[in-house]
Structures are given as structure tokens and as C-alpha cells.
Amino acid sequence: MNLDKKFSGYANPALHTQGLYIGGKWQAVGSIPVLDPSTGNTIAEVSDAGTSEAMRAVEAAEAAAADWRRTPARQRAEVLRRWFDLMTERAEELALLISLENGKALADARGEVAYAAEFFRWYAEEATRIPGEFRATPSGSHNILVDHEPIGISVLITPWNFPAAMATRKIAPALAAGCTVILKPASETPLTAYAMARIGEEAGVPAGVVNVLTTSKPGQITNTMLADSRVRKLSFTGSTGVGRTLLAEAAKTVVSCSMELGGNAPFIVFDDANLEAALEGAMVAKMRNAGEACTAANRFYVQSGIHDAFVAGLTERMAKLKIGAGYDPETQCGPMITPGAVEKIDRLVSEAKARGARITTGGKPVTEGGHFYPPTVLENVSHKADMCHAEIFGPVAPIIRFNHQKDVISMANDTEYGLAAYIYSEDLQRALSVGRKIETGMIGINRGLMSDPAAPFGGVKQSGLGREGGVTGILEFMEAKYFAVEF
Ligand code: NAP
């Protein structure tokens, strides 16, 4: 494959290595290598911000803040809409870039670009519909007027598994609300963030409204920014562990936090499910991004009557998937993000085997090339196995047999996480009533994919605080202001 020719235009890593993006200018400082996870080779070097660059980003966001919040909503919306159009025009180049630095299969990367761009279109529409309220008090003493104001400078921190969508899911509502932002993407996948900043510039985003910092010292620069009283919002997507640390740090200056954290989604198949639909949904819920998704089905609970057919069907489908570099159009399962990710998956599989699980396909790391783990199915998995309680974040499907509805509800809820769950049953009343008892923020019913910019995405328990997307997502970047009005 001629890689140089393939990675041209926006897909060219060299285009996105001009430095940090602060106040509409590119500034090169230090260097962090970016690797191709399918080979382990370095594909680019991006800048490495320290605390002084972080403070310059806060200054830039502050300098742009007053004009941006005064910019009429319709004008802000038009900038977001142009950003959507330009991203859509360059979808194929962006998908290649995502595949290159993240490793995901091109089909997944294309899906991510479309999903990511949609946040700009959705919030272009929502920018002009920011809600307010006016009513008399019950006692008739005065009138209540509620306005929503932009919350202020927002620090946005994103993970590597959806380098475009996790950024746009924050940037779009923040800008629609009238906030200026500082984006800190994951160090494994910074090129997509810089590519999007470049497209935003072309779409007419004024200097300083969006700033992008890459760094090898995320704790240090984030703490510095949070300590500055001009920073009023932290919107974080990543692991629950880092989320807890950041909540504690934000508490020092009482900064408003939105947290999109880890997940451990149960995928429940009842005897009365449509087998083909359940298998199709299982493949989407498990294998999107090769299992590296917060909403990925982490454990499959399958009722006895359909269990054997489900195990056979899933094994057959998983065994057929082609492993390879994400940007190879034939690939259906790309590499894991790091060697450490493969080691973790391997440890979880070994531990489940030691507890009596049987592997029906896969089960051993691929030893040649980059960091690959093959699509794997395990049956007879103990609910006590570590993989039922930790995020697997890989292409591994543990299957647990169950008999009674009450048992599966109790196993599904036996986790600190509460992001997503999937239920397959042809009895909608049963699916909804079980869904009500499952402690998650999102439930897929007879469907393996739930993400949609128009829907509120988020979790309960230790999967997070707040919601992104939907009609309420914009309010995460606004403060309600109440006027008590006498007239
Ligand atoms: P992570 O290790 O928590 O990192 C996420 C981001 O936080 C990265 O940009 C990282 O920077 C930064 N970071 C790390 N330590 C920090 C600190 N002390 N202060 C400030 N920032 C810090 O998570 P990940 O491995 O990238 O992503 C996978 C996790 O994200 C999984 O748990 C997954 O479930 C979760 N996730 C959740 C959602 C959701 O919507 N709920 C969506 C996607 C992913 P560096 O890259 O430089 O370390």
C-alpha cells in the first residue's frame, strides 16, 4: 500500500504538527511522538505544552470571550453549520487520519466522522433555541424571569478512543452556548484535534474561541488552569479514575464539572429474543472500535433457552473478522491502542479461564506486528471473573448463562459503573420493565448502537455526571440566572 499517497490533504499527519493552537496562532514547543498502533512506528511529533502555554491559552480564551458571547446566536450557529459542512466535505481524509493514529477500522472511522460532524449541525440548530422562563410566583408576590448565560471559559479533556466525536460533543454545545474553550486531546490521538481546529478556523471560528493544547503533563497543566478563577467549566471524557482525580481538583475552586466516564455495559438476551437481531446487535455493541468504546457490551447474559444458539452464532461471526491496520480497507478489527491494552486483555482472559471459562474463538494475543488481540468469545464465564467488573476495552465477549429475570437484573447492576445496557426481547413490555430496573443512563432495546447527537448521552453511578448531546447538552455550558421582577 502506498501510504504517502493515501495520507494526503487533511489525512497527512505533517499538516497537523505546526504546534499548539492558541489565540488563532500555531506555536511549536517541545515534542510528543504520535504512533501508528498497527505498526508501533512514529508517524508525527506534536507540541508539548507546559504551564506557561496553558496560561496563554486561558488568556486567549479570555480575550475572545466577551465578543463571542455577544455574537448573536444566529451568527454563532452559522459558524457551527459551516464547520459541519467542511468536516463532511473532508470526511474521507479525516477518517483516514483517525484510522492512522487510533487504529480503528476505516468503516468505524467513517462512522465516527459522520457522528462527530453531526454535533456541529445539531448545536447550530440548538444555538438559536436556548430556553428561558417567565412566570408569576405562586404567591403572586413578584415575577420570575430565568435567563441562561454562557458559563465561561471551558476546559475540555478528551480520550483517544473517539478523537473527533468526543471533541465535537463538547466544542459544539460550548460554542453554541457562547463559551470559549481550551481543548486538551489525548496524547495518543492529537492529530485529529488539530485537524479539526484547522477546519474550524476555515469555518470562521474567531481567534481564541477554540484553543488546542497537547501535553505530556496533563495533570500539571489542567490543575494550573483549574486554579485560575477565569476558568468556570471542566468537561471531561475518560476513565473513572482520572475523573475522580479531576473532580477533587475542581472542588478547590468550585469549578462546574461534566464527567463522561467508564462503562461496563451488560448485554442481556432473553429466550424470546429474535436470535439474528440479537447477534447482529451484539456484533455492533461489542465490535464497534474493536471493543474500545465506553458503551461497548462488556458482558453478555444469555437465557438458557437461547444460550447455545447465541454462543454458536457469535463465535461464527467473531471468527470471521479480519484483523489488520485500520486504514487497510479490508480490516474489520484494528489494533489495540497500546501494548499495555493487549496485556490487560490477556490478563483478564487468563483469569476468566482459570475460573472455568471456555474459549470458543480467539483467546491469544497476536504476536507479530502491532498491538493486536483477536476477536474472542468465552462461554461458561463466572460472574465473579475480573472481566465482568473491569472495562475490557477490547474485542472479547464473555458469555454468562442465566435462568431467571431477577438474577440477571441483579448481576447487571453489580458494578460501580452505570453508563449503558442492552436488552433483547420481543416482548417490549418486559424489555421496558427490566430497563427501568437497570441502573444505567442509557438502554438499547433490540438495538446495539445508541449514540446520537440528538439524544442525552451519559451515565449514572461512577460513569459520570451530566449529559452530552440532545436538547439539554447546551445547558452544561450555561448558568441559569434568576431575576426577581416587580411590576
Ligand atoms: P484517561 O486515561 O482517563 O484519559 C482521558 C484524558 O484525560 C486524556 O486526554 C488524558 O491525557 C487526560 N488525563 C489523564 N490524566 C490526567 C490528569 N491527571 N489531569 C488531566 N487530564 C488527564 O482515559 P483514556 O484511556 O484516554 O480513555 C478511555 C476511558 O474513557 C475509558 O474508561 C472509557 O470508558 C472512557 N470513555 C468514556 C466515554 C463516555 O462518554 N462516558 C466516552 C469515551 C471514553 P493523556 O492522553 O495525555 O494521558
Image (cartoon, rainbow, N blue to C red):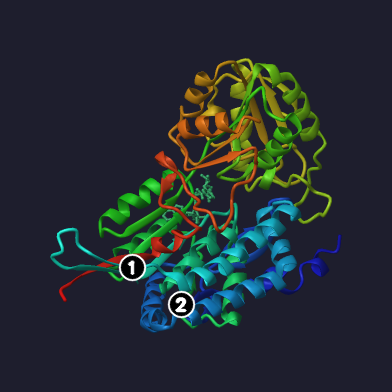
Toward the right, the furthest residue is: 1
> Residue 116: x and y, percent?
61, 62
Task: From the image, tell me which residue sits under label 2.
Answer: 209
Foreground of the two, 209 or 337 = 209
Give the left or right position of residue 402, taking residue 254 as reference: right
Q: How far is the residue under mark 1 from the one under mark 2?
A: 14 Å
Label 2 packing within 10 angstroms: few (<14), some (14-19), many (20+) = many
Circle 1 is placed at which residue position? 231
Residue in the foreground of this view, choosing between 277 and 359:
277
Ligand 1 within 8 angstroms of badge 2 C-beta = no
Which of the marked residues, 1 or 2, is nearer the chain's N terminus?
Answer: 2
Quadrant placement of the C terminus: bottom left
Q: Is mark 1 within 8 Å of ligand 1?
A: no
In the displayed structure, 108 sits above or below 318; it is below
Q: Position of residue 141 (x, y in %)?
A: 13, 65
- The quadrant in which the N terminus is found is bottom right
Residue shown at the point (51%, 34%) measured from the top left: 435
Q: Secondary structure at mark 2?
A: loop
Residue at 66%, 39% in the rendered image:
286
* Secondary structure found at label 1: strand
Q: Is residue 3 above or below residue 262?
A: below
Q: Is residue 198 left or right of residue 320?
A: left
Residue 10 quadrant: bottom right
Amino acid tagged 1: Val
Q: Is residue 88 left or right of residue 294?
A: right
Name the amino acid, label 2.
Val
Q: Position of residue 335 (x, y in %)?
A: 70, 46
Label 1: few (<14), some or many (≥20) within 10 Å?
A: many
